[in-house]
Image (cartoon, rainbow, N blue to C red):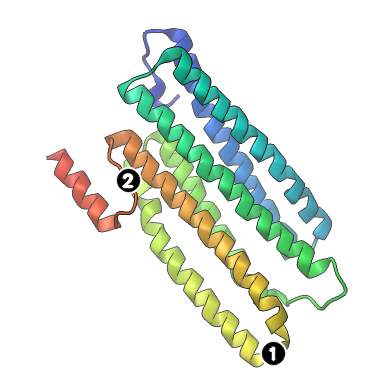
Amino acid sequence: MNNMTDGHTVKSFNDEMNHLHGQVLRIAGLARDQIRRALTTLEEEDPEAARDVVQNDDTLNQLDVEIDEDIVHLIAKRQPMARDLREIITVGKIVTDIERVGDEARKIALLTINFYDNHNSAPSYAVIRDIIKMGEYVDGMLERAVRAFDELDLDLALEVIAQDRELDNEFKSALRRLSTFIMEDSRLIGHAVEIVLGLRALERIGGHAKNIGGYVVFLIRGMDVRHKSLESVIADLKSSAN
């Protein structure tokens, strides 16, 4: 149980809030599974499994709709205020970002289909290695972001926000390595755009994880930290604590 959903005087409201909290963890688990499965299809050159990942995106979309309906129903029924309203708003924002994570995982699965379900030559593993590496990194970011929400861990939320800088460096390094591969073998030019799109999809997943970290800060401290640097966020947190 999340401390933010504990202690309501109306037990049914408490149960509804806990259910909403659990739905966030559920959709996040599905999204992370999509990321991992999409990366596996690419690593194992398995377009059939990739089609399953693409199809399973509908499950995420449906759960997104269900949670949105739960939020609307809860607000209309309970008319929450203060802390409760802040958590409900936060849940809505987190779920939106997680649904978009599913969309980006779908793009990775589509790469597998494009690379290995035709008669053209596929890129070597060395060329797609950065996609696998970045995919594992952003999956870890998402895991930490959701755990920060589940445990109301401000430090962990800030850690996720900080990780976005490292992800940006990894993205730029991957692009440089891809350029080197192309210079060594011009036949890779045909795959270059798709590989860049795959890397960009993973960068966006990291961005969604960072957003969730920011929502956790909002949930815990009531501060909107969107569009702020990490240094500015930390300074604002210290200032508000004094």
The quadrant holding residue 197 is bottom right
The residue that appears at 79% across and 53% down in the rendered structure is 51
| Left or right of 184, for residue 160 | left
Q: Is residue 216 above or below residue 119?
A: above
Which amino acid, by three-letter code, is at mark 1?
Answer: Ser
Q: Which residue is mark 2?
A: 155
| Left or right of 197, for residue 77 | left
**In this view of the protein, which residue sits in the foreground, 1 or 174?**
174
How far across and down, in percent of the image, does residue 240 sit? 17, 40
The C terminus lies in which quarter of the figure?
top left
Q: Are marks 2 and 1 in contact (CB under 8 Å)?
A: no
Which amino acid, by three-letter code, is at mark 2?
Answer: Asp
Camera sees residue 201: yes
Q: Is residue 201 above or below residue 216?
A: below
Mark 2 or 1: in front is 1
SS state under label 1 = helix
The quadrant holding residue 148 is top left
**In this view of the protein, which residue sits in the foreground, 13 or 132?**
13
Q: Which residue is mark 1?
A: 186
| Left or right of 69, for residue 160 | left
The N terminus lies in which quarter of the figure?
top left
The residue that appears at 45% across and 20% down in the rendered structure is 75
- Disc 2 crowd rating (10 Å Cα; few below 14, some 14-19, many 20+) is few
The total number of labels drawn is 2
How far across and down, in percent of the image, does residue 152 sit? 37, 35
